[in-house]
């Protein structure tokens, strides 16, 4: 279970997160929606220690993230970054097996490669891509490799940061289905950030909307269409008019 | 009038404070890097790759710079020395000039131009594409994996490159002196060898290590602290080379003062 308690974060005079309170149950797939620049990625990064919140606390299964032993703690997580964030100097299989070749999860090279190829196969990529460099792959393939890297060590919690950004609708659908399958199959806790409503419908058990530095609305996917919140309504239906201010 | 004065003082004060704060951040980064240098985990493959880039691949540019500088130095000293009826000092001055000053400084500046810029651009690109964040989430400290191998390679490659530059620079002077200025080869070599002492060579190598450290550290520092987008990468690259070049020249003055004014 992940608990956010009064999380606040500012960058200079820009108060990105004011007071975020949110609970993600174990084994649940939550999707965070919200406009661009509302701090969705910042929220995920606070859990992983990539950004330190100014105020508030985060607990993962009751453990205070700020006091967690970094290496052991991080090995519980997997993350799919928005642009893939693949290491462009190393071939695909080494990207996938990166964590398996270092630290306390270290495996012999042959075994690490074997696991990498198995994970690549799980995300629909054949062994022929294993020796290619990330720059030689399409955007969709890079996302798949990023996904394979995120699940390489069978983590308990996976974060997906804008998994379909930059992909065509068909590839977006493929990635959404893949994420859903993996989340169900592995029984992981998943936290996805997106403003793609198709992703929300495919991936989410629960949806939370971040607006003005706080959780505006949180509920089950079935309740999203009749949330009764004008902010959620405007966002879900993609209307320019409404309580959410837009620059024109 | 008073407003103008206070405004000027405020601007100058802000400039000084910002400069000192930047210097402090660089110093803390340097201390943090040094304090981790002998602590595991180590990444030998990254170190060898960095050593190849910093050292081996810099040899051609360092060699070419040194040979032309040594040759030009011989011509200048012959011309200047002739005014005092002392053109025979060419071997000694070429040797001392190359070994004590020009060899290390040219290597430092060449590393700053070639290596600092490439490290800064590489790490800055990794930062803007979230590869640094990905490293952290994969339980790998960027300081250990990216910074230490490069800085350690700089410390090791610096003296080797300086040794190469010193030798090739002196050789450049030798070629010009013996082929165009009429010096006897054996006498030239003898004068060079006899004039140089251990302190000259040690100071040269120490400078090489210091400049290698500065050049790689600046590349890493500015790369990891790059701003967003292509502008961030460009700004980090430019700042890293500027900072490395200035710090190398300042460190050269300090090291020269330490070695030769005691």
Image (tube, coloured by chain):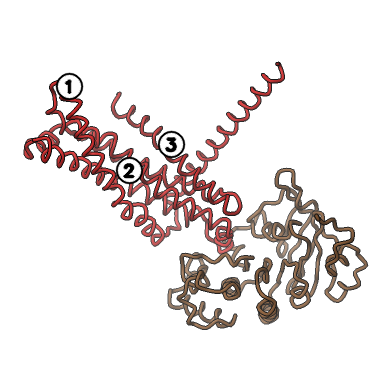
The residue to which callout 1 is attached is B83
Q: Is residue A128 above or below residue A26?
A: below
The residue to which callout 3 is attached is B247
Whichever of callouts 1 and 2 sits on the residue coming sooner in the sequence is: 1
Where does residue B83 sit, x and y in percent of width and height? 17, 21
Where does residue B232 sit, x and y in percent of width and height? 57, 50
| Chain of the residue displaying label 1 | B
The answer to whether residue B66 is left or right of residue B16 is left
Q: Quadrant of residue A183?
A: bottom right
Secondary structure of residue under mark 2: helix
Mark 1 vs mark 2: give the one in front: 1
Q: Is residue B153 above or below residue A166?
A: above
Mark 3 crowd level (few <14, some 14–19, many ≥20, 10 Å Cα): some
- Chain in brown in the render: A
Q: Are marks 2 and 3 on the same chain?
A: yes
| Chain of the residue displaying label 2 | B
Residue at 49%, 45% (x, y): give it. B238
Secondary structure of residue under mark 1: helix
In space, the residues marked 1 and 2 are separated at their CA atoms by: 31 Å
- Which hue is chain B drawn in? red
């Amino acid at each position: 279970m992940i608990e956010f308690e009064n999380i606040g974060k500012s960058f200079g005079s820009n108060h990105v997160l004011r007071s975020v309170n949110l609970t993600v149950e174990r084994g649940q797939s939550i999707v965070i929606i919200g406009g661009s620049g509302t701090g969705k990625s910042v929220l995920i990064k606070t859990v992983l220690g990539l950004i330190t919140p100014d105020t508030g606390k985060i607990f993962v299964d009751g453990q205070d993230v700020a006091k967690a032993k970094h290496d052991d703690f991080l090995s519980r997580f997997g993350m799919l970054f928005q642009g893939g964030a693949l290491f462009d100097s190393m071939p695909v299989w080494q990207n996938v097996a990166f964590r398996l070749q270092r630290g306390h999860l270290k495996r012999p090279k042959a075994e690490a490669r074997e696991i990498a190829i198995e994970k690549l196969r799980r995300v629909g990529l054949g062994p022929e891509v294993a020796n290619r460099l990330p720059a030689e792959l399409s955007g969709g393939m890079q996302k798949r490799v990023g996904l394979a890297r995120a699940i390489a060590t069978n983590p308990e919690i996976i974060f997906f940061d804008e998994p379909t950004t930059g992909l065509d609708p068909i590839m977006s659908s493929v990635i959404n289905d893949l994420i859903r399958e993996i989340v169900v199959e592995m029984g992981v806790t998943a936290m996805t950030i997106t403003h793609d409503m198709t992703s929300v419908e495919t991936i989410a058990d629960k949806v939370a909307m971040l607006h003005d530095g706080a959780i505006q609305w949180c509920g089950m996917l079935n309740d999203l269409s009749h949330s009764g919140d004008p902010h959620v309504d405007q966002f879900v239906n993609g209307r320019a008019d409404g309580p959410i201010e837009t620059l024109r | 009038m008073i407003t103008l004065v206070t405004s000027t003082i405020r601007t100058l004060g802000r400039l000084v404070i910002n400069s000192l704060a930047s210097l402090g951040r660089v110093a803390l980064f340097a201390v943090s890097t040094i304090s981790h240098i002998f602590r595991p985990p180590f990444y030998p493959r990254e170190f060898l790759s960095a050593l190849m880039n910093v050292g081996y691949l810099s040899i051609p540019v360092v060699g070419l710079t040194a040979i032309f500088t040594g040759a030009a130095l011989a011509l200048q000293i012959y011309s200047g020395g002739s005014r005092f009826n002392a053109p025979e000092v060419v071997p000694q001055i070429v040797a001392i000039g190359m070994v004590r000053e020009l060899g290390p400084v040219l290597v430092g500046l060449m590393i700053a131009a070639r290596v600092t810029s490439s490290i800064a651009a590489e790490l800055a690109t990794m930062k803007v594409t979230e590869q640094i964040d990905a490293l952290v989430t994969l339980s790998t400290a960027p300081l250990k994996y990216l910074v230490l191998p490069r800085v350690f390679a700089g410390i090791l490659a610096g003296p080797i490159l300086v040794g190469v530059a010193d030798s090739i620079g002196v050789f450049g002077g030798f070629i010009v002196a013996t082929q165009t200025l009429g010096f006897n080869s054996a006498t030239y070599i003898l004068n060079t060898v006899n004039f140089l002492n251990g302190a000259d060579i040690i100071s040269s190598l120490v400078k090489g290590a210091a400049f290698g450290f500065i050049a790689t550290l600046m590349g890493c520092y500015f790369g990891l602290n790059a701003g967003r987008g292509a502008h961030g990468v460009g700004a980090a690259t430019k700042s890293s080379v500027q900072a490395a070049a200035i710090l190398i020249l300042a460190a050269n003055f300090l090291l020269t003062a330490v070695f030769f004014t005691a």
